[in-house]
Image (spheres, grey):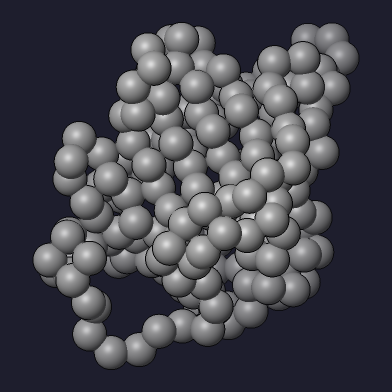
Amino acid sequence: MQRALFSLIASAALANAALAAPPSAGPAPATLPTPYSAQQIHDAWLPGFSVEMRTTEAGVVSSTRMTVISATPEAGVIRSESFAADGSASGPPSESAAKWSELRDHALFDAAKATRERAECRSLLGALPGWRYVVPQPDAGTLTMCFADATPGPPVEFEMIRDGKLLSRTEHVSYGPAQSGAKEKL
């Protein structure tokens, strides 16, 4: 299911590929404001910080935990771990480096296509005020992401809808200092 989460994020990135067009391709389209600055993400994502997200897709539940291993003012190293519904690891952990600005830019959306409005983000963390982005996809689907003001990083809730049907939903389970101990059953 980690693949599903990254597939959804990749879909959002592909929907915004024109935003990263080379200068010779003409002016980049205007974008909606991002929910957080790179500095806000840096300030929240200190070593030991962890966010866990639960994904439900086709009735199958899985989770992904991202933990900051190290951080500088420009970037961080993040370990990703994936778990099945019973809490067992669904693959080996992986680590990757990312600039805070790159993480911020995952939420750059073409202002002519996407919408942004104040909303109540709902997840297992509760109801939190934030920004909801609705991004139409080339396959007639829609990505809906809600970024809570108090949780810089990935969206608190993330849904993929096509033909009026919810294909997948990802939501925050935990956000903050790294959790220790055994993985609980989802």
The vertical placement of 52 against 104, above or below, is: below
User: Is residue 74 among the parts visible in the rendering?
Assistant: no
The vertical placement of 76 against 120, above or below, is: below
The vertical placement of 47 against 18, above or below, is: below
Quadrant of residue 58 in the image? Answer: top left
Residue 143 % position (x, y): 51, 29
Q: Residue at x 78, y 10 (%)?
A: 25
26 left or right, relative to 45: right
User: Is residue 5 among the parts visible in the rendering?
Assistant: yes
Q: Residue at x 51, y 17 (%)?
A: 137
Q: In this orientation, which residue lies closer to the viewer: 56 or 91?
A: 56
Residue 99 % position (x, y): 67, 57
Q: Residue at x 28, y 89 (%)?
A: 181
21 left or right, relative to 181: right
Viewport quadrant of the C terminus: bottom left
Q: Residue at x 45, y 71 (%)?
A: 174
Residue 28 % position (x, y): 82, 19
**How many circles with numbers are drawn on the protein?**
0
111 left or right, relative to 56: right
Quadrant of residue 94 in the image? Answer: bottom left
Quadrant of residue 36 in the image? Answer: bottom right
Residue 117 % position (x, y): 74, 36
